[in-house]
Amino acid sequence: MASTMRLLVLSPTIPYPPTDGGRIRVWNLLRHAAREFSITLCALETVSTDRQALETLRECGIEPVLVSQRQPKTPPLNAPAFLRALVRRWPLTVAKYAPPGVSRCGLSTARDATV
């Protein structure tokens, strides 16, 4: 019996409710992909409505994981961000904004995956 392919999606925000162009696009992509994939969405917790949207995401077959957002102590474009991007082989945008929980989310999901 074939198992469902798993997909990990990283997003700076929860795409629900779809109130702007970026959220509308991500929401529609996730909703349609959830028909064929087991999706885990790892996103920064940005506003109080994120918690309210979790149930809607789960109803669509998307498992949300919220990561608390830390306040940056340094400007986002700096030498440590570039170094993190190089060492971890991350895109620069991920290195600039990623709190520690994002890497833990990805690692725990990747460890659970079977190939």
Image (cartoon, rainbow, N blue to C red):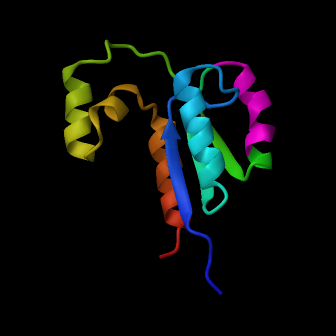
Residue 101 placement (x, y as % from top left):
51, 38
Is residue 44 among the parts visible in the rendering? no
Task: State the quadrant of the N terminus.
Answer: bottom right
With respect to residue 18, does 28 lie above or below?
below
Residue 4 placement (x, y as % from top left):
62, 71
What are the residue bounds of the magenta stretch? 47-57
Camera-side residue of 59 and 66? 59
For image coordinates 78% across by 39% down, the residue present is: 56
The total number of labels drawn is 0
Q: Is residue 19 left or right of residue 108?
A: right
Q: Quadrant of residue 72?
A: top left
Q: Is residue 24 magenta?
A: no
For image coordinates 26% across by 27% down, the residue present is: 81
For image coordinates 58% across by 20% down, the residue present is: 20
Q: Is residue 71 left or right of residue 87?
A: right
Camera-side residue of 100 and 56? 56
Residue 76 placement (x, y as % from top left):
32, 17
